[in-house]
């Protein structure tokens, strides 16, 4: 197992891509803290699944767009784990509107979770990582941050912001044993994608050279690669898992 002895926190780690990441890290031997906002049932089910194969998972609910709540969660996780090695900033939402129809609240909602959330979570754990001279931070961005999308100015801006922040942090933290990367999924089979009308799904598939949507597990394996010794020489990268949609 590649991550034996490591501790990890996955934001939005209870559903969709985050669930697959929590599971993959646990299967490689990491102890995993599952962050989520309010759906405790999904988180408890995942915790039970991880425990069933002998892994260790704890629940770490918090609203990552809220700094005091994120700080409280970090104290809880550090108390239970002692330290944190791996932070996966995965939690993210969409709230689509054309720019003409986009009100300030819709803009702020997406930015506060997708971008401020990455600041909040990284901020509360980075000092510990610097102190232990080890850390792996993986931010989940999106192909939409690279190419933009109709009705997603807020989402695209948030993800492009995270991608740029990733590179800056990679430079700042390189001398401190901390690698910072992002993984940019294309369209992955999760609730976010199955909610898209079938007609639009068809149109999307025609633009993907591999002619299928990705699987959450395929994104999770990229995260494992970045956190395992194989990824030790990779920092500041944005690795794409998009079926060739953007190249
Ligand atoms: P999802 O299935 O909608 O799951 C969202 C997760 O985030 C849930 O665990 C949810 O908790 C949590 N969450 C939402 N708001 C939160 C908050 N304020 N604080 C803490 N946790 C919060 O999401 P997904 O589709 O797997 O997407 C995961 C990431 O991949 C996102 O960053 C997304 O932008 C990115 N991505 C997805 C796709 C795709 O095709 N799906 C493509 C590119 C990028 P609750 O269960 O409690 O609500």
Image (spheres, rainbow, N blue to C red):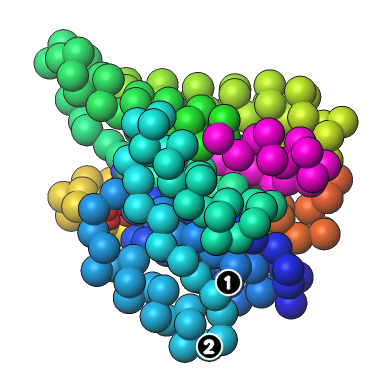
The magenta segment: 124-145
Reply yes or no: does residue 186 show up in magenta: no
How busy is the neighbourhood of tag 2: few (under 14 within 10 Å), some, or many (20 plus)? few
* For marks 2 and 1 on the same chain, the one whose residue lies earlier in the sequence: 1
How busy is the neighbourhood of tag 1: few (under 14 within 10 Å), some, or many (20 plus)? many
Q: Is residue 57 left or right of residue 41?
A: right
Residue identifier under label 1? 26
Asked if the residue at tag 1 contacts the one at tag 2, i.e. Cβ–Cβ closer than 8 Å, the answer is yes
Q: Quadrant of the N terminus?
A: bottom right
Give x and y (percent) for residue 209.
50, 51
Q: Is residue 100 left or right of residue 213?
A: left
Could one spot residue 41 in this view of the protein? yes
Give x and y (percent) for residue 156.
39, 26
Dot 1 falls on a residue whose secondary structure is helix
Could one spot residue 144 in this view of the protein? no
Vertically, is 100 above or below 231?
Answer: above
Q: Residue at x 21, y 49 (%)?
A: 196
Vertically, is 197 above or below 94?
Answer: below
Spatial CA distance of label 2 from label 1 is 9 Å
In the rendered image, which quarter is residue 102 located in? top left
- Disc 1, ligand 1: is the CB inside 8 Å? no
The outermost residue toward the front is: 79
In the picture, the disc for residue 194 is none
Residue identifier under label 2? 53
Give x and y (percent) for residue 226.
71, 52
Q: Residue at x 64, y 51 (%)?
A: 84
Give x and y (percent) for residue 194.
24, 57
Q: Nearer the viewer, residue 197 or 91?
A: 91
């Amino acid at each position: 197992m590649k991550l034996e002895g490591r501790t990890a926190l996955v934001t939005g780690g209870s559903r969709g891509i985050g669930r697959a990441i929590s599971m993959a890290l646990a299967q490689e031997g990491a102890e995993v803290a599952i962050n989520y906002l309010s759906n405790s049932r999904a988180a408890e089910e995942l915790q039970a699944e991880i425990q069933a194969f002998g892994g260790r998972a704890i629940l770490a609910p918090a609203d990552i767009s809220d700094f005091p709540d994120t700080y409280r969660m970090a104290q809880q996780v550090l108390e239970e784990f002692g330290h944190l090695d791996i932070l996966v900033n995965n939690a993210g939402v969409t709230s689509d509107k054309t720019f003409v129809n986009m009100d300030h609240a819709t803009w702020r909602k997406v930015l506060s979770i997708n971008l401020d959330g990455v600041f909040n979570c990284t901020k509360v754990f980075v000092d510990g990582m610097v102190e232990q001279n080890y850390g792996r931070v993986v931010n989940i961005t999106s192909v939409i941050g690279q190419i933009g999308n109709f009705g997603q100015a807020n989402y695209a801006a948030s993800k492009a912001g995270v991608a740029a922040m990733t590179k800056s942090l990679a430079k700042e933290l390189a001398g401190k044993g901390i690698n910072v990367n992002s993984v940019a999924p294309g369209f992955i089979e999760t609730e976010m994608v199955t909610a898209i009308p079938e007609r639009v799904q068809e149109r999307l598939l025609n633009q993907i050279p591999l002619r299928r949507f990705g699987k959450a597990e395929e994104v999770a394996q990229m995260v494992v690669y970045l956190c395992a010794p194989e990824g030790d020489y990779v920092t500041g990268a944005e690795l794409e898992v998009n079926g060739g949609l953007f190249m």
